[in-house]
Image (cartoon, grey):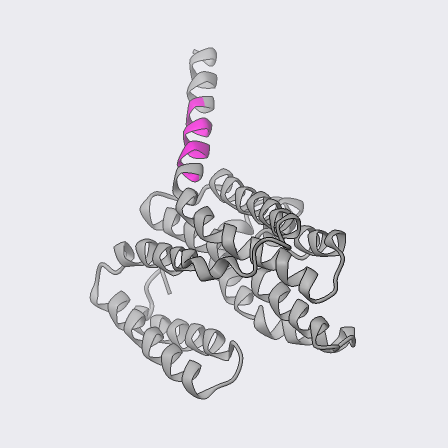
């Protein structure tokens, strides 16, 4: 009986890893051109290949890395300004972290910190989608997060190596894979009137804010307003 339970547990773990790898594959296709572009941009900004790769290893934040590299390339060397700017861009992680907190706070603190480092838009979207479809799985989140991390680092390395041969891989049009994947993950979750209202509100606010506000503020504002709207519509339910 114990052997049967052990084998069953191992099978469940293996299945969870396989599901994670299968579901993050389309996202990986969208990550690769951005990682290559990051490597090329680092060289263009007069960073060394090693510095560019280490940035992906220790920072692992696409938008923040692009902004940091752009600022360095423009001659801005004040670390305080660079850190503050990237912090503002990544404020959305507070919202994503709050959304996953009810599940992650049950984990050991060291594991929470480990997973928090790997939290990205893509990892969050896949993890939250898995929660709605089945349940929260630490192994699923860990597999998705580390896979995306490895692909990002390797794509950055490829960008550094191929920097003299490729000017801008985003001109290939592969960057469309990313928003397309997010839409595929989002649409199945729009199953009732509340979710449709929140979705519509977020879409309208983000478009208007992107038109009239500088930088990436449209992301933060749309997230906050959509979260507030969702909370009001949920009222006193457990999901609120």
Identify which residue, 66 or 83, lies in the foreground: 66
User: Residue at 48% across / 18% down in the picture?
Assistant: 6
Residue with the most extreme front position: 165
43 drawn magenta = no
- At which x and y percent is residue 28? 46, 47
Q: Is residue 234 left or right of residue 137?
A: left
Identify which residue, 56 or 10, lies in the foreground: 56
Q: Is residue 137 left or right of residue 88?
A: left
- At which x and y percent is residue 156? 62, 51
Q: Relative to 119, say whether 214 is above or below.
A: below
Identify which residue, 76 or 181, lies in the foreground: 76
Residue with the most extreme bottom position: 212
Q: Quadrant of residue 163?
A: bottom right
User: Residue at 50% across / 38% down in the picture?
Assistant: 139
- Magenta span: predominant SS is helix
- At which x and y percent is residue 58? 70, 53
Which range is magenta?
11-20
Q: Relative to 36, say whether 66 is above or below.
A: below
User: Residue at 34% across / 58% down in the picture?
Assistant: 180
Quarter of the figure with the C terminus: bottom left
| Callout count | 0
User: Residue at 42% across / 23% down in the picture?
Assistant: 11
- At which x and y percent is residue 81? 72, 78
Quarter of the figure with the N terminus: top left
Q: Is residue 192 left or right of residue 59?
A: left
Identify which residue, 103 or 209, lies in the foreground: 209
Q: Relative to 45, say whether 126 is above or below.
A: above
15 drawn magenta = yes
């Amino acid at each position: 009986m114990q052997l049967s339970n052990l084998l069953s547990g191992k099978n469940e773990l293996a299945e969870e890893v396989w599901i994670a790898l299968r579901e993050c594959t389309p996202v990986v296709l969208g990550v690769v051109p951005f990682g290559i572009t990051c490597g090329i941009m680092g060289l263009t900004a007069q960073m060394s290949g090693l510095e560019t790769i280490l940035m992906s290893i220790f920072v692992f934040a696409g938008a923040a890395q692009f902004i940091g590299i752009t600022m360095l390339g423009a001659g801005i060397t004040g670390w305080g300004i660079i850190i503050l700017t990237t912090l503002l861009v990544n404020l959305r992680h507070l919202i994503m972290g709050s959304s996953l907190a009810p599940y992650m706070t049950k984990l050991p603190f060291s594991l929470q910190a480990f997973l928090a480092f790997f939290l990205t838009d893509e990892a969050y979207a896949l993890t939250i989608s898995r929660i709605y479809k089945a349940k929260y799985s630490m192994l699923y989140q860990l597999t998705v997060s580390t896979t995306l991390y490895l692909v990002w680092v390797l794509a950055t390395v490829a960008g550094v190596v191929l920097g003299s041969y490729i000017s801008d891989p985003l001109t290939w049009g592969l960057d469309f894979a990313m928003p397309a994947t997010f839409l595929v993950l989002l649409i199945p979750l729009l199953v009732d009137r509340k979710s449709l209202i929140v979705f519509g509100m977020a879409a309208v606010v983000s478009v208007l804010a992107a038109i009239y506000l500088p930088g990436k503020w449209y992301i933060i504002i749309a997230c906050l307003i959509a979260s507030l709207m969702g909370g009001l519509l949920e009222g006193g339910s457990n999901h609120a």
